[in-house]
Amino acid sequence: ELALSAVGAAFDSGWKIPDDISVVSYGRTPLSGAVRPTLATYDIDWKRTADMLASVTLKRLENPEMPFQQMSVTAEFVPGNSLKNKTV
């Protein structure tokens, strides 16, 4: 996970999380709560996202002239201790 790499790089550089740098993750993996400080993260419904992408891809294969569509995926913010400013 990219956020865990950022935590490691910050540690290696002597930076303190969240005093010197804030880190936010996405996808809410079990590691988000296992590291210290716990990571603030955005929890994404991956199954719903994959279903939406598959549906649009199949429609596009059936109709290549179909106009492009804009889609959005909702995410729930899960607070952690990796943010200096806890206001979101």
Image (cartoon, helix red, strand yellow):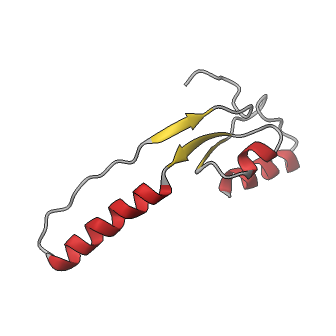
Expressed as whole percent of the image width and height from the top left, the position of residue 42 reads 56, 42
Q: Is residue 3 above or below residue 84?
A: below
Q: Position of residue 67 (x, y in %)?
A: 14, 63
Q: Relative to 4, is 43 on the left or the right?
A: left
**Image location of residue 5, percent across then percent down:** 74, 55
Quarter of the picture holding the N terminus? bottom right
Q: Nearer the viewer, residue 13 or 70?
A: 70
Residue at figure coordinates x 74%, y 31% from the top left: 81
Q: Quadrant of the C terminus?
A: top right
The image position of residue 30, as x and y in percent, is: 72, 51
Direction from residue 82 to residue 15 in the image, left or right: right
In-image side of 19 versus 62 (left or right) = right
Q: Nearer the viewer, residue 19 or 44?
A: 44
Residue 6 visible in the shown view:
no
Q: Return the residue nearer the eye: 20 or 47.
A: 47
* Position of residue 82 in the picture relative to residue 69 (left or right): right
Residue at 58%, 51% in the rendered image: 27
| Residue shown at 81% from the left, 45% from the top | 35
